[in-house]
Image (cartoon, rainbow, N blue to C red):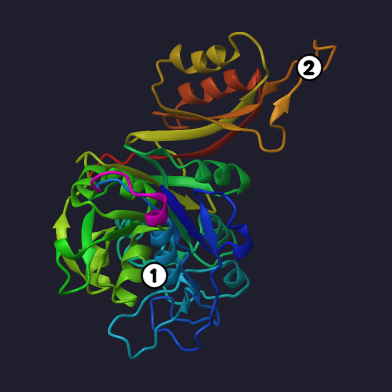
């Protein structure tokens, strides 16, 4: 297998199975008509991570064939531009917020403004609109940009993925929850239904490549293997659809949502191509202020804590919930970035060290419930750090 990554310096072509090519950033002057109601002088750069795989082909591809394919891909994706679309285009595409936009005030209008990661047509946009109907969904280039946009009052809320039923946890957002001071005020369970999208006139038998987010490609493994196409990883599903549409590619499709097909005027070659129909992504709703927890409906509480090293310490931490019949729905451990290794006090030679972890826990109870309050008081007696990330209503819908 050969792989090409767009956006790295040209002198990084060193590893025999992973090659890098440089990508120039060009700024195209123009105005953009979109839901942001304001245009900026920076364009969007679609960062492509390309991997060439031989899966689905009869026999093993020879090294020379792999190298030829890599060269071909470098020619196709060389010099990815920074796109902006004028008001004369048939569709108005909101350009994602970048780090440079965070210093600009774009507050306008009375609708609640909700940040999500990706471009228009992303599953995160649909989740934001489910969480806040009639909202103004604001795309952001990266997860941390969405956090900062809420903190700096550019938007009112953020809706970001935290876990998927097939792919597991989104570790980046767990780390950002601790780094920033936003509060979890709700959750959204969103079913992911992948479609195979191509430009009009392109048939399935014409396809040689399929672009999408790595998780989306993995979730459609069987379908794509049967098609015998090369899978190429990009930053997000809707970005893949946008790239195929903008470049009018005739041999390339994208795995993305039905909404992306509508936005970028693409043909849906197949629907529900995911291997497992039970493909659910859980999103968190984030705000600057917490919600007041109640007991009139099911609530969930999310916390993060750390513990001293020792036998049975984690058992003791979890027992504070078990002895009060509080159900845990999620536990996730993440390394302490500022102190990844810990040396016990009793270690005299300095050779004995432990990995230091934070523990994220979700449990089904409201912080308005005295039972929950007592559990956290008990946990605080031996936890070295404890923070409540939010207490919020449980989403029981899957539509």
- The label nearer to you, 2 versus 1, is 2
- Give the magenta-colored segment's residue range: 57-66
Measuring 50% from the left and 13% from the top, which residue is drawn there? Answer: 319
The structure residue drawn at horizontal position 47% and vertical position 72%, both measured from the top left corner, is 78
Distance from Cα at disc 2 to Cα at disc 1: 58 Å
Q: Main secondary structure of the magenta part?
A: loop
Q: Is residue 345 above or below residue 56?
A: above
Q: Secondary structure at mark 2?
A: loop
Q: Is residue 166 above or below residue 61?
A: above
What's the residue at 55%, 44% (across, down)?
A: 177
Residue 187 vs residue 172: left or right?
Answer: left
Classify residue 336 as left or right of residue 343.
Answer: left
* Residue 26 image point, x, y percent: 53, 80
Residues at discs 2 and 1 in contact (Cβ within 8 Å): no
Decide which of 357, 212 is in the foreground and name it: 212
Q: Pick whichever of labels 2 and 1 is earlier in the sequence.
A: 1
Say the numbered circle drawn on residue 285: none
Where on the picture, by quarter, is residue 99?
A: bottom right
The percent coordinates of residue 335 (x first, y second) are 61, 32
| Residue 387 percent coordinates (x, y) | 60, 34
Q: Viewer-proximal residue, 187 or 207?
A: 207
Number of the label disc, if any, that sits on residue 351: 2
Left/right placement of residue 144 relative to residue 293 reads: right
Residue density around tag 2, few if under 14, some if 14–19, many if 20 or more, within 10 Å: few
User: Residue 112: in sight, yes or no?
Assistant: no
Q: Which residue is mark 1?
A: 111
**Which SS class for mark 1?**
loop
- Where residue 257 appears, as percent x and y from the top left, is 25, 59
Quick one: label 1, few (<14), some, or many (20+) residues within 10 Å? few
Q: Is residue 331 above or below residue 123?
A: above
């Amino acid at each position: 297998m050969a792989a090409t990554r767009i956006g790295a310096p040209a002198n990084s072509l060193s590893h025999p199975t992973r090659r890098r090519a440089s990508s120039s950033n060009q700024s195209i002057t123009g105005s953009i008509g979109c839901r942001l109601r304001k245009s900026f002088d920076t364009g969007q750069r679609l960062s492509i991570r390309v991997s060439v795989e031989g899966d689905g082909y009869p026999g093993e591809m020879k090294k020379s064939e792999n190298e030829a394919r890599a060269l071909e891909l470098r020619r196709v994706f060389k010099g990815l531009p920074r796109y902006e679309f004028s008001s004369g285009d048939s569709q108005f595409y909101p350009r994602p917020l970048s780090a440079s936009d965070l210093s600009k005030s774009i507050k306008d209008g009375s609708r609640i403004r909700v940040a999500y990661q990706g471009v228009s047509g992303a599953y995160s946009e649909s989740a934001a609109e489910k969480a806040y109907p009639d909202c103004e969904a604001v795309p952001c280039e990266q997860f941390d940009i969405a956090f900062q946009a809420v903190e700096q009052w550019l938007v009112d809320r953020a809706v970001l993925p935290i876990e998927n039923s097939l792919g597991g946890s989104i570790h980046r957002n767990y780390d950002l929850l601790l780094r920033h001071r936003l509060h979890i005020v709700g959750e959204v369970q969103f079913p992911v239904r992948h479609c195979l999208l191509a430009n009009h006139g392109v048939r399935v038998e014409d396809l040689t490549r399929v672009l999408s987010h790595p998780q989306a490609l993995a979730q459609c493994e069987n379908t794509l293997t049967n098609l015998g196409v090369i899978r190429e990883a990009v930053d997000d599903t809707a970005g893949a659809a946008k790239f195929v549409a903008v470049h009018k590619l005739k041999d390339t499709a994208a795995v993305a949502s039905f909404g992306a097909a509508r936005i970028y005027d693409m043909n849906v070659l197949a629907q529900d191509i995911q291997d497992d129909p039970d493909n659910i992504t859980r999103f968190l709703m984030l705000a600057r202020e917490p919600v007041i927890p109640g007991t009139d409906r099911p609530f969930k509480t999310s916390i993060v804590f750390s513990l001293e090293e020792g036998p049975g310490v984690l058992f003791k931490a979890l027992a504070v919930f078990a002895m009060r019949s509080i159900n845990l729905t999620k536990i996730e451990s993440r390394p302490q970035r500022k102190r990844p290794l810990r040396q016990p006090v009793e270690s005299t030679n300095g050779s004995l060290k432990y990995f230091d972890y934070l523990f994220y826990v979700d449990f089904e109870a409201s912080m308005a419930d005295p039972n929950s309050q007592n559990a956290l008081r008990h946990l605080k007696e031996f936890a070295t750090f404890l923070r409540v990330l939010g207490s919020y209503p449980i989403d029981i819908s899957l539509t």
